[in-house]
Structures are given as C-alpha cells and as structure tokens.
Amino acid sequence: MPGRADGIEARTRGVGGGVMLLGVQRLAAAPVHLDHIFEEPDVRPLHPSSCTCREHPLPAPMRVRDARDAYLAENGFTTGSYDAPTTAGSLFGLRFSVPNPPAHRRAIRLHDLHHVATGFGTDHAGEAELSAWQARRGLLSAGAYVTAIVLTNVAMGAVVAPRRTWAVLRAPSTGPSLFSVEVDYDALLERTVGELRALLDVPTDGLATHRRELHPHAPRSA
C-alpha cells in the first residue's frame, strides 16, 4: 500500500517496491516475471514457530514491533522514511521521488503492518496481492492519493501476476484494514502478530501462499 515503489509505492529510504507512491509499494519496482502467470502454488515446508525466514509469513507469537523491524531490515527500509518530505521509489528499475504528504505518511506505516500481517512480499506480485487485499477491505479512509496507488498496483498485478491477484480479490473478505480502524499505532506495535491478524480477521498464519520475495533493491543478504 503506501509509498514506495513496487508496482507503485513511494518512500524515502534507499528503498524500492513498485510504482507505489505511497508506500503502498515502495516504489522499488521489481522486475516483471511473466512466469507468475503460469506458476503453480508454492508447497512450502513446515518451519518452527519462531522461524523468521521468507518461506512463510512472520510467526504469530512475535511482537509486532519486532516483526515490523525484521520486515524493514530485509527490505532495506527504515522508519526514517515515514516522515520524510519525499519518498524514493522505482518503477521497473527506474528510480524517482514523490511527495510524502500526511495521508501517505500514515499509509506507509500501516502498509508495512499489512505486510507483516498478511505475509505478502514486496516484489511486484506481492505488492499486487497486498494492494488487492487492501482494496477488498475498503479504501474510503485511505484518501485519494493512497487509493490511486493501491488501485494502480492492482492493475499492474493483472499483468504480472493475474492468478495471484485475482485469487486475493475474489477471496472472502469481511474484516477491516488498518486504514479504516482507529488504533493507537504505538500500542499496536507492542501486541503480537497473532493479535494483529485477529484484529484484521486474517488467519493466524497469514495469507501468503508463496515465498516472501523482495523488491530488486533489497539487501542481497536478505
């Protein structure tokens, strides 16, 4: 969702995610792999409940703050970009900066927690899945700027990962997103990932069915 660049996200970190000016996808665009269209679902191995590898969503017992920080670290993001005047991103490898107005600053923070809760990655396919999930949960409280970024990412998903994007769009979705929930952000960070998922009506083990892939500018060690 909000400002960075994968598909569509923007953020000032040395970051990237899609074209998202919002953080909605940190504008660090991932290369387009059309094989997403034909790929078979991942069959991921079972891991210990404390495991934080990218083969599956972050563990439910983990504190939200720690999970968010782990997510930021593996992507090369920092909390400093949350309040920066602009956010840096890229689209198909081309870097650029976009404004980071108040609505987008709020969205980036919440967008990151949506990644933690769902387990979706920050490559184009993952950002498309997350944007589809956010769209299904409602964008009335997100603002026009953030909404435009989310919907653009969904449209991109129809091209780079149609099956995965469509699967999220048509899945039953009765819970809220953090865009529409009034919560104390700092207090939420002290809760567990499992409690965050319960708040959003997300399964205990998250929603992602594929390995958590990263945007192209993420640290190579991630």
Image: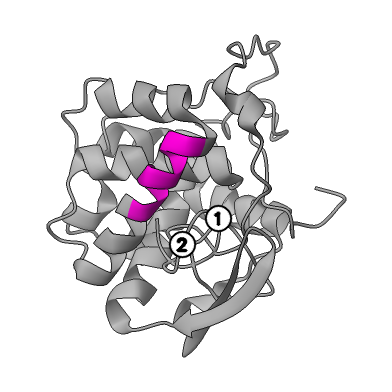
Which kind of residue does numbered mark 1 sit on?
Asp
Report whether residue 207 is seen.
no
Q: Please say if 78 is above or below 195.
A: below
Nearest the viewer among 158 and 89 is 158
Task: Tell me if residue 68 can be seen.
Answer: yes
**Between 90 and 140, which is closer to the camera in this rendering?**
90
The residue at which mark 2 appears reads as: 20
Query: Where is residue 117 shown, x and y percent of the image?
Result: 43, 39
Q: Secondary structure at mark 2?
A: loop
Left or right, 93 with reference to 21 = right
Which range of residues does the magenta coloring cover? Answer: 152-159
Residue 157 lies in magenta, yes or no? Answer: yes
Question: In whole angstroms, how far apart are the C-alphas of marks 1 and 2?
Answer: 6 Å
Looking at the image, the residue that sits furthest to the bottom is 85
Up the image or down, 187 lies above or below 130; here it is below
Looking at the image, which residue sits at the far left? 140
Residue 59 percent across, percent down from the top left: 57, 31
The disc labelled 2 sits on which kind of residue?
A: Met
Image quadrant in which you'd find residue 88: bottom right
Q: Quadrant of the N terminus?
A: bottom left
Across and down, in percent, residue 202 comes to 33, 29
Q: Residue at x 21, y 40 (%)?
A: 137
Circle 1 is placed at which residue position? 6
> Do the residues under discs 1 and 2 have CB atoms within 8 angstroms?
yes
Q: Residues within 10 Å of mark 1 (few under 14, many from 20)?
A: many
Determine which of the numbered discs, if any, sits on residue 136 in the image: none
> Up-down: is 14 above or below 127?
below
Residue 111 rendering spot, x and y as whole percentages: 41, 56
Q: Secondary structure at mark 1?
A: loop
- Please identify the dominant SS of the magenta region: helix
Q: Residue at x 65, y 73 (%)?
A: 95
Disc 2 packing (10 Å; few <14; some 14–19; many ≥20):
many
